[in-house]
Image (spheres, rainbow, N blue to C red):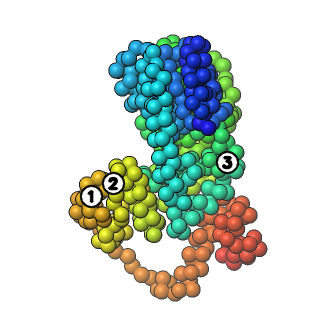
Amino acid sequence: MFKALIVDDDPTFCLMLKSYLSNNGFEVKEVFSAGSALKAVGEHSFDIVLTDFRLPDFDGITLITKVRKLYPDMPMLLMTRYGDIRSAVTAIKSGAFDYVTKPVNPDELLLTVNKALSNRQQSKKIAGLSPRSISGEINYLRGTSAPSMMVEQYISLIAPTDMSVIIQGESGTGKEYVARMIHLKGPRKNKPFVAVDCGAMSNELAASELFGHTKGSFTDAHSDKEGQFEQANGGTLFLDEIGNLSYENQLKLLRATQERKIRKIGGNKDIGVDVRILVATNDDLSSSVQRGAFREDLFHRLNEFKINVPALRSRGEDIVLFANYFLEQANLELNKQVAGFDNEVTDKILSYHWPGNIRELKNTIRRAVLVAQGSLLTLADLPPEILSPPVRRAEPSRISSGQTDLKALAESQEREAIEKVLKQVHYNRTLAAQLLNIDRKTLYNKIKHYGIEG
């Protein structure tokens, strides 16, 4: 039985619509304000939300935007008695599946609702094509290569805790999806997951988005605004490109993480929040600290654990695994029947450097499926930048005598691996032994043998 949430300030209309949907096999809950709707979606699991455009606290388009940030795959329908095409277009851009006009035609509404649910089920079917995709999350793939498996181990270790995590990696490697995995595998999985792109906000906008503001606190502040910390309360706040936050906002973030309190712009009282912080960056924050571009105290507060997400080019066999997944995804999305890749395309996919990582691979496969004329993708279907990439000049390397000693090389690599993992887990030797797949006694002996300090 599908569960629907109706958001409308007209009790009579809610009762009518609830009765109609209930008679057609739906379990229905109704609320009368946008604020109550946000609370409801945080406490219950719904398959679809139907919201009026005019609500007593804020409008339906704003509600759609907020819900979509929390639950990106949630189908949303806008209902408006005005039939305003501009509102409809804005709603679609904000993430609504569709809109219906009032007075509502029940049969038309039911058809639209079923279409939205069918579309969501198709997305889940796409996710089911790969046994390594997250249940309910179609955008993250679990690889089988050693670097990918290491990330999986880190996620499994850190998810049950409440520790802050720095997720570091190149653009397009899937840092947000790693954050979502940590959230989904942790105790806060039934609470909100709120993602914020710090790189897309000005200094003033960032403060307002993160902490909220009060009415009249600055020009255009026509009403009180709830910040992302409040929206994520009880759940997880993911701050992407954390290095772009201004020094002033870094200080506010430090206070929020240490004291679990925030203060809105223009406000005069503190608001308690319970939020797990996950951050991502494609820069080395420790280098940013040394340059004075990032607060050292905030860095140490956030760096309770670090996960380095590997570049696609270092994942070996995962590249073809991911390419096949994106092929199936594109087939369903574009209604195509491409069966696979010819040998030349496979060789090209494996040899290409993929500077844009997983995001670039996905876009490349999707474009190739769109233009493909045959049952297999050929070189003619690939874009020019993949066929003739700029020549990458490698720096010449010198081989020292020690590099030809296989035993010395093996010991050097083993010591480096042990030191790296120990630093990663802040010298928690139990966690380090688990990640290295050795017992604690063996780890202690190797630490002593190599003279590793920490």
Residue 191 x/y as whole percent: 65, 37
Q: Quick one: label 3 or label 2, which is nearer the N terminus? A: 3
Q: Residue at x 33, y 60 (%)?
A: 338
Q: Quadrant of the N terminus?
A: top right
Residue bearing the label numbered 2: 336
In-front residue for pair 110/251 = 110
In the image: residue 274, left or right of residue 381: right
Q: Is residue 320 above or below residue 195?
A: below
Q: Is residue 35 above or below residue 135?
A: above
Tell me the element at label 1. loop
Residue 346 x/y as whole percent: 34, 69
Q: Residue at x 59, y 80 (%)?
A: 411
Residue mark closest to the camera, 1 vs 2: 2
Q: Residue at x 40, y 51 (%)?
A: 332
Tell me the element at label 3. loop
Q: Quick one: label 1 or label 3, which is nearer the N terminus? A: 3
Q: Is residue 338 above or below residue 316?
A: above
Classed neighbour count for the residue bearing mark 2: other residues with Cα under 10 Å, few (<14), some (14–19), many (≥20):
some
* The quarter of the displayed image where residue 439 is located: bottom right
In-front residue for pair 285/161 = 161
Q: Quadrant of the C terminus?
A: bottom right
Classed neighbour count for the residue bearing mark 1: other residues with Cα under 10 Å, few (<14), some (14–19), many (≥20):
some
In-front residue for pair 292/168 = 168
Residue 372: numbered disc: 1
Type of amino acid under label 3: Gly
Residue bearing the label numbered 3: 186
Q: Are marks 1 and 3 in contact (CB under 8 Å)?
A: no
User: How many numbered circles are shown?
Assistant: 3
Type of amino acid under label 1: Ala
